[in-house]
Image: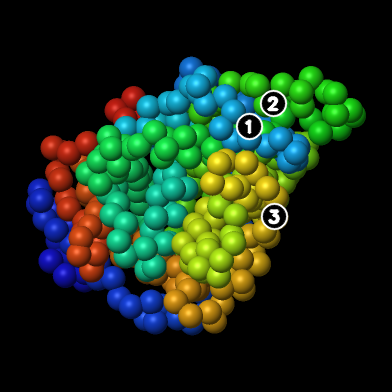
Amino acid sequence: MSSSEPTSRTRQSSQIYRFPILPPSHYHGSPAPYAQPVELTSFSFDGTRTLHLDDRELRYYYPPDLTSCDLSEGYDTFIQRDDSTPDPIDALLDALVDYEKTVGDKVARKTNFVTWRGIITKILCTPYNRNEPWVLGATLWNGFNDRKVRYMNEHLTSRRKAEIESATPRHKLMTYWGYKFENLCTVSAKPSEITSPDHPELLSRKSSVVNNNVQYCSVAKAALGKNKIIIGAEVDCLSDVKPEKGENPIERYIELKTSKVMTRDKDKINFERYKLIKYWTQSFLIGIPRIIVGFRDDNGFVKHLKEYKTLEIPRMVRGKRNMWDANVCLNFANSFLSWLRVVIAEDDPRASYLIRFKEPFREIEVLFMGCNGTAAVNERFLGVL
């Protein structure tokens, strides 16, 4: 099948639809509008990966002590969640169900896509990440009128599985550095409550156990062009007290990142070309205005911090040779999601579609798997959302 609209609403199992990856120049021009994300609700995972429909794991930003910011400290006590299987969207749906019961608004039925931020990030970055495969699962359910809701989750690619299995001790340690940085930059106490450098939380940050089962997640609604999206995203921390319901807290969220100290022109080019596109996409999608990067040396010691304003990042790379263009990312994603809404049209919670981007990276394939694949929606949500 071509990328044109299917002629029949009855899909056959294993039928394939293809979306060609055109050169970035095809998507130049004014960007598809992206509506400011608005938080609907939030939820937490505790240290045992138990879901809580509240803000108990919300953390606040408090700068680390750079005189002794060792990201390797505590690695021997690191509690790491199993990342061999991507998180399903069950927690996101649980949060939506709770929100709809509380507010009395069937918000999920008023959107086109419900998914994790990481999935939309992969789509936006695809025009420039032409060597990174990804696989998604999707299910259409409770569609009516022009609001046909597609629930999308991530599948583990064979490449990612091989990377996990072959990870060296050095690679595992460097992965830990990112989690440790978050630990050293955040506190559970409100910033106004910390009035002394001897506050217990500040004194215990270095030695506290890092457990990446713990997460605080925001659920927000947004729109790219005519594609309405509900996105679930992990949030690292808050700059100030979270406002009361009715106000949008997203403008107070902060994203934390680590990166190698840039000592050569090549380092700067690689940082701008490969890292800033992901930093911008991740924060822009959920509406996070600030990104704080801890630049560390090869031994995992943070040397300095730098703050980036999300909306200013695209201007940092604009017009530079072999760089990326935010407008291209938005226009590509808008085009692809609009096409996906046509292709994924079988309204059945037991049916599934497989969406994959793989070698030679010239197109995105969508396969209708019938009722034999793994549906994105858990059966326990039937009749609830």
Distance from the alpha carbon under mark 3 to that under mark 2: 21 Å
| Local crowd size for mark 1, using a 10 Å CA cut-off: few (<14), some (14–19), many (≥20) | many
Residue situated in front as seen by the camera: 232 or 258: 258
The residue sitting at 38% across, 77% down in the picture is: 24
Mark 1, secondary structure of its residue: helix
Of helix, strand and loop, which one carries label 2?
A: loop
* Quadrant position of residue 74: top right
Q: CA distance from mark 3 to mark 1?
A: 17 Å
Q: Which residue is at a point 50% across and 68% down the rendered structure image?
A: 266
CA gap, disc 1 and disc 2: 7 Å
Disc 1 to disc 2: CB gap under 8 Å: yes
Check contact, mark 3 vs mark 1: CB within 8 A. no
Q: Say which amino acid is labelled 3.
A: Lys
- Residue at image position (10%, 51%) is 14
- Quarter of the image with the N terminus is bottom left
Which residue bears the numbered disc 2? 205
Residue 119 locus on image (x, y percent): 40, 50
Which residue is labeled 1 in the image? Answer: 183
In x, y percent, where is residue 268? 56, 66
Colour option used: rainbow
Q: Residues within 10 Å of mark 2 (few under 14, many from 20)?
A: some
Residue 92: percent from the left, percent from the top? 46, 35
* Image: 383 above or below 174: above
Return the x and y of residue 38 as percentages of the image width and height.
62, 49
Q: Amino acid at mark 1?
A: Asn
Q: Which residue is mark 3?
A: 306
- Tell me the number on the disc at residue 17: none
Between residue 304 and residue 219, name the one nearer to us. 304
Asked if residue 298 can be seen in this view, the reply is: yes
